[in-house]
Amino acid sequence: MSCPEGRQCIETVARVVAEQQGFSLEKRRKEVVLRTKLDHVEAEKELKKLLENTENVMICCGRMGPMCIPVYAIMEGLQDRYAHVAFRDMDYDGPASDVVANLPECASFMGLPMTVYYKKGQVVAATASIQTKEQVTAILDEKFGPPPGDG
């Protein structure tokens, strides 16, 4: 697909990708909100509680965009298989995102999404930008162990 219209074309491509992946894009108060099937982390307090009470956590902090949508879709597809991991998303423009964006592990990141893997409340891995299913599962297996029954 060629994009002679620039930004408008990029937004059209993002919308098409989102719809193909089963996402709903809705405009609200000049914001575009991505609706995923993941549980959302919307506040710093909520993140802190999650990390205190959950051993393995993967959080994808991003926006509605062509680099983030595939990562959300991968996470949704892995939730049942990796039942020992809590998969969450976080709006990069929301108030809680500063916690992720200001992590030393994310300091040099120039792209979205920022995906952070926590084990027992500590960051054990972090990535930026689009990831493949193979890249995500390699990190999950290494840091949290393979899914029950796989290894």
Image (tube, rainbow, N blue to C red):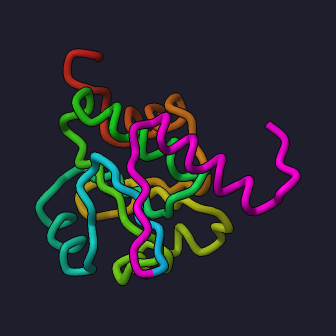
Question: Residue furthest toward the right?
Answer: 4
The C terminus lies in quadrant: top left
Place of residue 109 in the rendered image (x, y in percent of width and height, measured from the top left): 63, 67
* Magenta segment includes 85: no
Residue 73 drawn above or below residue 147: below
- Residue at 40% from the left image edge and 45% from the top image edge: 23
> So how many labels did they put on this image?
0
- Residue at 50% from the left image edge and 57% from the top image edge: 126
The N terminus lies in quadrant: top right
- Residue at 44% from the left image edge and 68% from the top image edge: 27
Left/right placement of residue 106 relative to residue 142 reads: right
Using the image as rendered, state which of residue 59 and residue 72 is in the foreground: 72
Which residues, given as a range, are shown in magenta?
1-29
Place of residue 58 in the rendered image (x, y in percent of width and height, measured from the top left): 34, 52
Using the image as rendered, state which of residue 123 and residue 29 is in the foreground: 29
Q: Quadrant of residue 2?
A: top right
* Magenta segment includes 4: yes
Q: Quadrant of residue 83?
A: top left
- Residue at 23% from the left image edge and 55% from the top image edge: 39
Question: Residue furthest toward the left?
Answer: 53
